[in-house]
Image (cartoon, helix red, strand yellow):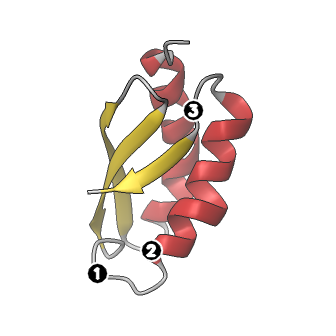
Amino acid sequence: MAVDTILLNQVLDAVRPSLEADGGDVEFVDVDDDGVVSLELTGACAGCPMSQMTLSMGIERVLKEHVPGVTSVRAI
């Protein structure tokens, strides 16, 4: 199943304010045929030791819940 990148970006836009509140942001890079979403954490999130938890417990959970076809998220 192809992932709807428009919906994916809309969901990322909904998540973005909480990242921006901590001085960071996230940029959508790509999604592969297996539903793996590649994201780039920027700003304060780029070097944060909690960034992996932010990805898996936060962003990945929300994307999997709201965007059909998303299987996982990885940082690049």
Residue under label 3 = 70
Kindly report the distance in space between the C-alpha atoms of the residues bearing marks 1 and 2: 8 Å
| Residue 67, horizontal then vertical, whole percent | 63, 27
- Label at residue 4: none
The image quadrant of residue 41 is bottom left
46 relative position to 36: left or right: left
Q: Are marks 3 and 1 in contact (CB under 8 Å)?
A: no
Q: CA distance from mark 3 to mark 1?
A: 25 Å
Residue 36 position in % (x across, y down): 45, 38
The local crowd at label 1, few if under 14, some if 14 to 19, many if 20 or more residues have their Cα within 10 Å, is: few
At mark 3, the secondary structure is loop
For the residue marked with disc 2, what is the amino acid? Ser
Q: Which residue is mark 1?
A: 47
Rounded to the nearest whole Å, what is the CA distance between mark 3 and mark 2?
19 Å
Coordinates of residue 49 in the picture (x, y in percent): 41, 87
Q: Amino acid at mark 1?
A: Gly
Q: Residue at x 58, y 38 (%)?
A: 71
Q: Nearer the viewer, residue 22 or 40?
A: 40
Mark positioned earlier in the residue sequence (3 or 1):
1
Residue 51's label in the rendered image is: 2
Tell me the amino acid under the disc marked 3.
Val
Q: Residues within 10 Å of mark 3 (few under 14, many from 20)?
A: many
Q: Residue at x 45, y 17 (%)?
A: 6
Q: Position of residue 28 (x, y in %)?
A: 33, 39
Foreground residue, 25 or 54? 54
Q: Residue furthest front?
A: 34
**Relative to the observer, which residue lies in front, 23 or 31?**
31
Element type at mark 2: helix
Indicate which label's residue lies in the foreground, 3 or 1. Answer: 3
